[in-house]
Amino acid sequence: MPNYRRNFVKGGTYFFTVETYKRQRILSGEAIGILRESFRECMSEKPFVIEAIVILPEHLHCIRRLPEQDSDYSTRWKETKGCFTSEYISNIGEPPVKPSVSMRKKGEKGIWQRRFFEHTIRDENDYRVHIDYIHYNPVKHGLVTAPKDWPHSSFHHFVKRGVYNESWAGSVEEFPEGMGGE
């Protein structure tokens, strides 16, 4: 197994990929509202800024910026996932795929994959490429034909701010191979 080390930069900006357990397609409908509320709750206790986000049925990508002097994104993900899991089970029910024995021993419910992919944003170009990747992702996965057609994306906020025009659609070939941790 590779010896992967996470990069912790105080006040850093990070790109994340977070997947549901066994890529269950559970992030839709009522679950979207639960996820948004889970982000808000975590942000109220351990602040961060969501720079960009897209939520697909079985995974999400986002860019988070942490406060100066803080590099603890792992706890923030743990809290967000935990809050979502509790509310999901209370409001929607148990997930369709049951957790493994190992997961059950650790008290995990089988909603989220244990780990997440993280990439530290290095500069403005890296930031822009990852923003574009996030917004193009529903097209990449064949869910829509244009980013404007996916409702669970910050793309619409970027259009309102004038960063994109509504007909924007980058090409999947423009993204580095292996980008997104998938």
Image: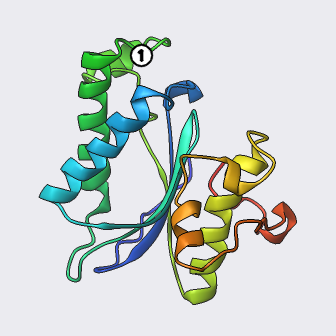
Q: Residue furthest left?
A: 45
Residue 65 position, x and y percent, is: 36, 73
Q: Is residue 136 above or below residue 123?
A: above
Answer with left or right where residue 99 lies relative to residue 132: left
Q: Is residue 82 left or right of residue 28?
A: left
In depth, the one of 36 and 75 nearer the eye is: 36
Inspect the image, locate mark 1, and give the three-letter code of the amino acid beneath it: Pro
In the image, farthest residue toward the bottom: 124
Asked which quadrant contains residue 148, the reply is bottom right
Disc tally is: 1
Callout 1 environment at 10 Å: few (<14), some (14 to 19), or many (20+)? some
Q: Residue at x 30, y 80 (%)?
A: 11
- Residue beneath the point at 57% across and 88% down: 124
Q: Which residue is mark 1?
A: 99
Determine whether the residue tagged by mark 1 lies in a helix, strand or loop.
loop
Residue 74 vs 50, above or below: the answer is: above
* Front residue of 35 and 116: 35
Place of residue 87 in the rendered image (x, y in percent of width and height, measured from the top left): 25, 27
Task: Measuring from the top left, give residue 39's x and y in whole percent.
Answer: 30, 50
Residue at (49% x, 59% y) in the render: 62
